[in-house]
Image (tube, rainbow, N blue to C red):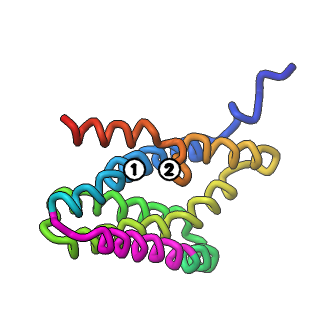
Amino acid sequence: MSTNTPFKRIPAGIWALGLVSMFMDISSEIIHSLLPLFLVGTLGTTMFTVGLIEGLAESTALIVKVFSGALSDYLGKRKALAVLGYALGALTKPLFAVAPTAGVVLTARMLDRAGKGVRGAPRDALVADIAPAEIRGAAFGYYPGIACENGCRCLPGRSAGYGLWLF
């Protein structure tokens, strides 16, 4: 039996992308799980406003994702677009803490989700570019396992967020 399993042969760039994505998703889950409480309890907005902000933000991510994939294919600058998307998401996180109005939260949320849309398709294409053909399936199997895809594996992040809110 060979000890050189596909898991051990996954390139370092894919490990790095997975870890960056995991930490970005955890930070997003911590903030976004508390956002409705902040908007309604602290800023005094209505639940309708919370729904409107969330709907506009997620729509932004989905629309931007379509164009970022095409732009990534056209330019071939996958890493630059992925870095731009992660930077945009990271730079918006402090805005939530200092937001005095729902408008600032809406702006920060839309910029954060635009960053998600910008980084998604180029990041996936980058994983495909980096991974050797014979282990590409293992690379795509590993990547969502470490990243908190769709928030389903981010229970520790949510728990930490609620813990910080309570204490």
Residue closer to the observer: 89 or 161: 161
- Asked if the magenta segment contains residue 49, the reply would be yes
Residue at which label 1 appears = 29
The stretch of residues the image draws in magenta is 43-65
Residue located 83% across and 22% down the image: 2
Residue 78, percent across and down? 56, 66
Q: Secondary structure at mark 2?
A: helix
Is 57 left, or right, of 72 in this rendering?
left
Is 4 left, or right, of 109 in this rendering?
right
Residue located 33% across and 37% down the image: 160
Of the two numbered discs 2 and 1 on the same chain, state the one appearing first in sequence. Answer: 1
Mark 2 and mark 1 residues within 8 Å of each other at the beta carbon: yes
Q: Residue furthest top?
A: 1
Give the distance between the C-alpha atoms of the residues marked 2 and 1, in whole angstroms.
Answer: 7 Å
**Quadrant of the image containing the N terminus:** top right
Is 126 left, or right, of 45 in this rendering?
right
Q: Residue furthest right?
A: 1
Secondary structure mainly formed by the magenta segment: helix
**Quadrant of the image containing the C terminus:** top left
Q: Quadrant of residue 97?
A: bottom left
How many neighbours does mark 1 have within 10 angstroms: few (below 14), some (14-19), or many (20 or more)? many
How many neighbours does mark 2 have within 10 angstroms: few (below 14), some (14-19), or many (20 or more)? some
Residue closer to the observer: 31 or 64: 31
Q: Quadrant of residue 90?
A: bottom left
Residue 5 in the image: above or below residue 157: above
Q: Amino acid at mark 2?
A: Gly
Q: Secondary structure at mark 1?
A: helix
Disc marking residue 151: 2
